[in-house]
Structures are given as C-alpha cells and as structure tokens.
C-alpha cells in the first residue's frame, strides 16, 4: 500500500509540510511563539531547556533539537536563540542543515530585542513557508512510514483493546518494510522479560535491561513508593493497581516483532524496523522523543482520554473505552469496538487510518491545535 | 480473565455487591458472587489468595496481596502492592 507524502531532498518523506520555528532555549520561547502565530504554514517547538543544565542534559537538549529539525514533516527551520544561552545556536543549525533543508537562525540579543527579532523572524519564516507551499504530495510506499506508538491516560481497557490494536498496526508496518518506534521505559517495569525475548541480539537485550534498571534506580533513589506518580491517580481510578499491571498492558502496543535497537533520548534510528527510545511516558517529553526519532505519524491509544498532539506531527487518538468515545468526541479519532471486529481486523482499520492521516487528513488534535507545549526530557537538575 | 493462570478477572461493566458472574476458571464455568461493588475496568478475585501471595493477570505477576483475599473480593490498591520501584522499602519514606 502507499500514501501521499512530501519527498525531501535527502529521500525522507514528510506527511506534513511546515516550517519549524524552533526555540533554542527556554528564554527564546516568547519570540518563537509570536513568529509562529504570524506565519501561516509554520509550527513552533517551545520547551523548557537549553540553558543552565549539566553537561549530559545540555547534550541531550542539543541532540533533540537537531533531530527535531531533521523531522521530514518540516520543510525548513527557523532557529530562535536568545544569545547568551548554554546551547550554541550555530552548532544546532549546522546539525539541522545536514538534513539538506534550509535553516535560518535569529539571535534576539544581536537584533536589538524581541520586537526586532519577531520582525526579522517573520520575514525569514514567511519566505521559507511560501517556498515550501509549492511542494506537492507524491505517492510513496508504506515502507517510508515511520510510526510512533504511545499510550496515555490509561485505564484497564487499554491492555485489552486499544494497545493490542496499536500492536497489530505496528506489526503490519514492520512487515511492509516500515519503521515503528515506542518507548515509555517506566512502563516496561515488570514486563521486561517479554521485550528482552524480542531483542535482535543479546546486546540489545542487555540494553533493554540497562535502561529499565536506570529508570527504576532514579525512582527508588527518591526514597518513595512511586504509586500515584506511576501508575497515575487516573490510572488507579481506571482500575490499574500496580506498575507491573500497567506495563503488561502497555508493551503490547509495540506488537510482536523483533526489536532492532535501543535509542537514547533525542537519537534517530539508523535503519528500518522496530526501535525503542529510552524515555519516560509523560506526553510533553515522550512525544518530543518520537518526533526527534523521525516519526511522521503517531498512534496514541487512551483509556480516559488524553488530548495532546504535537505541533508538527499528527497524533491519532484511539480508545477501546465506549464511555470515553462518547464523552470526548473532540479528542478521539477512532473507537475500537471489538463487538464488530477482531484485534487483527481493528489493526487493519487503524493501518488504513494511519495511511489516510499520513496523506493529509487532519487528526482531532491537529484540528484544534492541542499539543503546543511539549518539552525535552532531562535527567539532572537545573543549575 | 486473560490467561488460565490468572487469579483475578477484569470486569467490563459496573458490577454491584451481591451480583454473580460466571467465569471459566480452572477449566470449568464457576460462579463468583461480588463481595463489593466492582467498577468498570477493575478486578475481582477468582481464588482464595493468602497474604503475601502473588496476584496473577495476563498469566504474569502484577503484585502481592497485603491481606487474605477471598473469591469475589474487589482487588485493587487497598489489598495489593507492587514489588517494583519501591524506594520506600529501601530505608526511604512511605508515600
């Protein structure tokens, strides 16, 4: 099967055609937002990082910003810097330019402040957006798809209905030569043996063990029971009693195929197939990791009704909870009704919807612009 | 019930205390009378589970009973705990 996408000069395929207005640091968010509001065809990336962090977090922020700039849903990038932040904008811009797309940088302190920076930024972004609007969609094989898989605001229906459906769609994408990325390492705790069994090599299996041990240690070092934080209060109200129960229901969304490798936060996969990205499950940080890994479409299964999308990646919301489907029609794209279909059939329907959205159909989150406040995950303190 | 090994089942409707439900447990249809209200998506016990015994769902351990649990009892955070990411058990503070 195929979809209609934007073929970029480096061979990657976008499902959207935005100019990314990317903030280089938390202090440049306002100007980034103002420019994006003024330019049709642009999408902002605002976040809380980029300055006064320890070296590992600065490197993670830099890696993530470069990878976001590479996302093929962006036809070009305007990088917005304050000027005195820890991250050097020139290095980020050079990294993004390796994708072959146009990159411009503005520095607020050098331009004489916010008003002047907005004026300059709007002009640059306007020119890039008008140029990008001349691009046409073309037929692309589904092997060009890079799908992100996420679950959130989970209840007990998730492990039974929506997540296995995501898993069936994931298997179809893998079997057709495409790429799938999942993560939410906290929600591997108690289900690691299922993932390790699917690792491509013993080394990948060891990496899975390592990333789970790493996040579990971070949690236990705080000296508390994490229940309430994970599973969340809402998860518990939805019937999930422990992290093990949540994890066993969560990992099925990745399907059943071989796991090729484990990516660090902000990394991009080297090849096709199924990958894990090491990140916690909270939406602002995790959706960013999927976009940074190059996902052009994300499937997000929910039980209680998570509304978040992402500024330049369409996010398809699915649920198996009939009550959520009825009460939150503004947010749910697909209700999975197992009275009418089996999991493999529901997976086929979801796969078709993924191709449809990849070809340009709006998701609910896109249509109302929900998801403008992502973030970048950090492991250390702000200093 | 998701695996023949499970000692809990998830309900896909709100059940009231005193209502009975038939489940294929241990290879034969068995009737369970709900000891408490069980909300949609929540679990009840299929067996007599001793304190400190494992709770099994998906055929896997999802936690440990903190008190004895009888067939038909509501099973949730009031009577089971996680064995993982428990900083409070390593000399830390209880949540």
Image (tube, coloured by chain):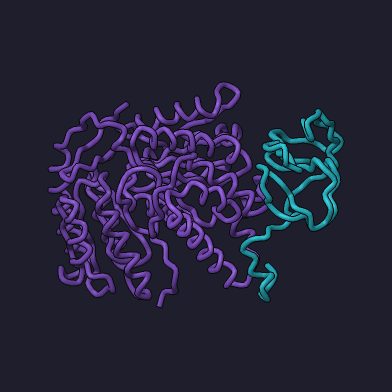
In the rendered image, residue A365, in percent from the top left (x then y), is placed at 41, 41
Residue placed at 55% from the left, 23% from the top?
A341
Residue placed at 23% from the left, 70% from the top?
A88
**Residue A284 visible, this orientation:** no
Q: Nearer the viewer, residue B17 or A29?
A: B17
Q: Nearer the viewer, residue B87 or A329?
A: B87
Q: Nearer the viewer, residue A137 or B47?
A: B47
Say which colour chain A has: purple
Residue placed at 72% from the left, 41% from the top?
B5
Q: Which image quarter: residue A54?
A: bottom left
The answer to whether A200 appears left or right of A97 in the picture is: right
Position of B72 relative to B90 (above/below): above
Q: Nearer the viewer, residue A310 or A109?
A: A310
In the rendered image, residue A143, in percent from the top left (x then y), is placed at 30, 35
Residue placed at 68% from the left, 43% from the top?
B59
Position of A146 relative to A64 (above/below): above
User: Furthest-front residue in view?
Assistant: A202
The N terminus of chain A lies in which quarter of the figure?
top left
The C terminus of chain A lies in which quarter of the figure?
bottom left
In the rendered image, residue A38, in percent from the top left (x then y), is placed at 23, 50
**Residue B71 visible, this orientation:** yes
User: Furthest-bottom residue in view?
Assistant: A383
Say which colour chain B has: cyan
* Total labels drawn: 0
In the rendered image, residue B81, in percent from the top left (x then y), is placed at 72, 57
Position of A9 relative to A47 (above/below): above
């Amino acid at each position: 099967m195929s979809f209609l996408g934007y073929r970029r000069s480096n061979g990657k395929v976008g499902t959207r055609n935005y100019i990314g207005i990317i903030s280089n640091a938390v202090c440049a968010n306002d100007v980034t937002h103002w420019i994006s509001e003024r330019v049709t065809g642009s999408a902002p990336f605002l976040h809380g990082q980029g300055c006064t962090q320890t070296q590992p977090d600065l490197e993670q922020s830099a890696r993530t910003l470069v990878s976001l700039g590479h996302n093929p849903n962006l036809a070009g990038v305007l990088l917005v810097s304050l000027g005195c932040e820890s991250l050097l904008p020139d290095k980020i811009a050079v990294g993004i330019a390796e994708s072959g797309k146009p990159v411009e940088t503005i520095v607020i302190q050098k331009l004489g402040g916010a008003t002047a920076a907005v004026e300059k930024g709007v002009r640059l972004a306007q020119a890039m957006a008008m140029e990008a609007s001349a691009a046409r969609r073309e037929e692309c094989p589904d092997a060009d798809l890079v799908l992100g898989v996420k679950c959130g605001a989970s209840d007990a229906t998730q492990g039974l209905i929506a997540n296995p459906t995501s898993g069936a769609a994931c298997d179809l994408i893998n079997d057709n030569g495409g790429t799938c990325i999942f993560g939410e390492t906290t929600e591997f705790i108690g289900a690691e043996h299922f993932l390790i069994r699917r690792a491509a090599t013993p080394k990948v299996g060891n990496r899975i063990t390592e990333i789970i041990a790493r996040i579990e240690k971070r949690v236990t070092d705080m000296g508390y029971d994490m229940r309430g934080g994970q599973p969340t209060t809402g998860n518990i109200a939805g019937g999930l009693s422990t992290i093990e129960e949540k994890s066993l229901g969560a990992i099925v969304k990745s399907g059943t195929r071989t796991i090729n490798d484990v990516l660090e936060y902000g990394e991009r996969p080297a090849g096709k197939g199924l990958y894990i990205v090491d990140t916690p499950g909270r939406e602002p940080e995790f959706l960013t990791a999927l976009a940074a890994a190059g996902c052009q479409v994300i499937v997000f299964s929910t039980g209680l009704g998570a509304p978040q999308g992402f500024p330049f990646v369409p996010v398809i919301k699915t649920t198996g909870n009939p009550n959520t489907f009825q009460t939150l029609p503004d947010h749910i794209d697909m209700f999975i009704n197992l009275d009418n279909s089996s999991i493999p059939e529901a997976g086929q329907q979801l796969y078709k919807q993924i191709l449809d959205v990849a070809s340009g159909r709006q998701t609910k989150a896109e249509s109302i612009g929900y998801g403008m406040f992502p973030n970048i995950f950090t492991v250390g303190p702000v200093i | 019930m998701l695996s023949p090994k499970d000692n809990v089942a998830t309900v896909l409707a709100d059940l009231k205390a005193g209502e009975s439900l038939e489940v294929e447990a241990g290879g034969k249809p068995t009737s369970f009378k709900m000891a408490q209200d069980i909300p949609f998506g929540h679990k009840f016990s299929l067996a007599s589970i001793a304190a400190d015994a494992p709770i099994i769902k998906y055929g896997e351990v999802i936690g440990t009973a903190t008190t004895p649990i009888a067939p038909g009892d509501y099973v949730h955070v009031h009577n089971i705990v996680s064995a993982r990411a428990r900083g409070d058990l390593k000399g830390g503070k209880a949540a």
